[in-house]
Image (tube, helix red, strand yellow):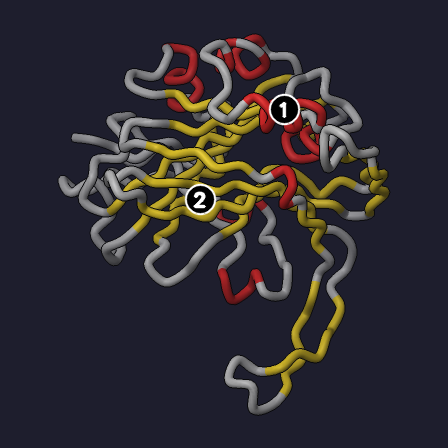
Amino acid sequence: MPRAVGACAVLVLAVAAVGCFTPAGRRSEALRPPTPAGLPPALPDGLYVESVLLERPLGDPALDRELWEGGSAVPPHVRALLAENGLRVAVLGGTPPPAFRRLLESGADAHDGRGQSFANRKDEVVPTAGPTDPCSFAVLPTLAGERARFDLRKARGGVLVRPERAADGRVKVWCEPRVQHGERADEIRPTADGTGFTVQGVVPVERFPALGFEVTLGPDDYLLIGSPAAGADTLGSVLFTADAGGRPRQRVLAVRAAWRGEKPSDLPPVRGRGEPTRR
């Protein structure tokens, strides 16, 4: 029976308005086997996005080199700008390479599986790393521009994901780096109906739309987003580097997208750290 890869979630649209990330480990869960239609039965019809974080020691051959040997999934000028910011993107289509399958099936290397229906929301932010305190990095907004310096406290990285069904039945996915930082503070905002005001907790979020990109995924495709081990002091290192007892760890975000009723995966479920695999 086909099985789902990983699941996606952090920032529900209602919460996204106030710029709040959920810590990555809070909603970690093992992936459930899909129904014959391809997706869990409780989900409404519509777009469904899954994600999982792959994590190994910094410089691991699979995460740092092998997964990227097929080339980039974005135009050359986008690839060049992403590379300047320590980011890289690839799409694995068809049968995944053995190294990728091993990572997905590993209880130690694949975790924080998330899944979300987009029937009633437009986008979400998938958390990838943090908190990091202090957090310093530079961003090059355009190839002809100058680097801007960011010095943040309590920074959490994530990737905004906005799926849209393409005319041929595949799914176009817009991805955009985000970094939440600092403390939550109350802010007065208009209510949804515009008849009054409400107090909402707001956490500052740095958005990087110039570094956003779009890929189109078929039912057997995996989107990979990561950063090279040599990408220190870049936005990519903030998003995809973690610390484990003083030892740096490298991360890659793997994303799937499908329309309900289409097979999303034939891989076994991925479990969160410390959780039993569900069969």
Numbered mark located on residue 102 in the image: none
Q: Is residue 88 left or right of residue 163?
A: right
Closer to us: 109 or 161:
161
From this view, report whether residue 191 is shown above or below residue 122.
Answer: below
**Residue 165 in the image, given as x and y percentages of width and height:** 32, 46
Which amino acid lies under the numbered mark 2 shown in the image of this protein?
Cys
| Quarter of the rendering occupied by the C terminus | top left
Measure the C-alpha gap from mark 2 to mark 1: 19 Å
Q: Is residue 197 left or right of residue 125?
A: right
Q: Residue at x 74, y 45 (%)?
A: 155
Numbered mark located on residue 8 in the image: 2
Q: Residue at x 57, y 8 (%)?
A: 61
Residue 103, quarter of picture: top left
Residue 209 is at least partly visible in this image: yes
Q: Residue at x 76, y 25 (%)?
A: 246
From this view, report whether residue 25 is shown above or below residue 83.
Answer: below
Q: Nearer the viewer, mark 2 or mark 1?
A: 1
**Residue 128 in the image, given as x and y percentages of width and height:** 59, 38
**Residue 113 in the image, given as x and y percentages of width and height:** 43, 38
Q: Which residue is mark 1?
A: 227
**Residue 169 in the image, given as x and y percentages of width and height:** 24, 40
Compare marks 2 and 1 and give the one earlier in the sequence. Answer: 2
Q: Are marks 2 and 1 in contact (CB under 8 Å)?
A: no
